[in-house]
Image (cartoon, rainbow, N blue to C red):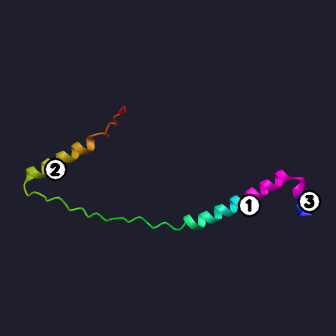
């Protein structure tokens, strides 16, 4: 009975067969290629604290440098023509 319906409606039969093949192929490829990814290694960077000066001038200069750095806006983006 199923074969007779397939012969009378060939477009529907071909569409169903293609859908089944695509489904099976997708499942197969996801199993083969879609395994769990290894987590990326995160290297911990340790920051060494800057040596502090014992004079008042050194700390005043450091404060001025910090103020200058924070007062600056973001860098301008330069558009380059290639």
Mark 3 → mark 2, Cα distance in angstroms: 89 Å
- In the rendering, at what x and y percent does residue 70 appear? 26, 45
Pointers 1 and 3 in contact (C-beta within 8 Å):
no
Report crowding for label 3: few under 14, some 14 to 19, many 20 or more residues within 10 A (C-alpha): few
Residue at 63%, 65% in the rendered image: 28
Please report whichever mark, 1 or 2, sits nearer to the chain's N-terminal start. 1
Residue shown at the point (52%, 68%) measured from the top left: 36
28 lies above or below 59: below
Residue range of the region highlighted in magenta in the rendering: 6-20
Q: Residue at x 33, y 34 (%)?
A: 78
| Quarter of the figure with the C terminus | top left
Mark sitting on residue 62: 2
Q: Is residue 44 magenta?
A: no
Using the image as rendered, state which of residue 20 and residue 68 is in the foreground: 20
Q: Position of residue 38 (x, y in %)?
A: 45, 67
Q: Which mark is residue 20?
A: 1
Q: Which mark is residue 4?
A: 3
Marked residue nearer the N-terminal end (1 or 3): 3
Q: Nearer the viewer, mark 3 or mark 2?
A: 3
User: Splitting the image into 4 quarters, where does residue 3 fall?
Assistant: bottom right
Dividing the picture into quadrants, the one containing residue 22 is bottom right
User: Residue visible at 17% across and 45% down?
Assistant: 64
Which is the main secondary structure of the residues drawn in magenta? helix
């Amino acid at each position: 009975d199923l074969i007779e319906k397939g012969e009378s409606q060939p477009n529907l039969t071909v569409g169903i067969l293609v859908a089944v093949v695509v489904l099976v192929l997708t499942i197969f490829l996801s199993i083969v290629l879609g395994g769990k990814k290894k987590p990326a290694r995160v290297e911990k960077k340790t920051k060494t604290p800057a040596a502090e000066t014992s004079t008042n001038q050194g700390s005043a200069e450091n404060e001025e440098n910090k103020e200058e750095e924070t007062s600056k806006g973001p860098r301008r983006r330069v558009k380059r023509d290639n």
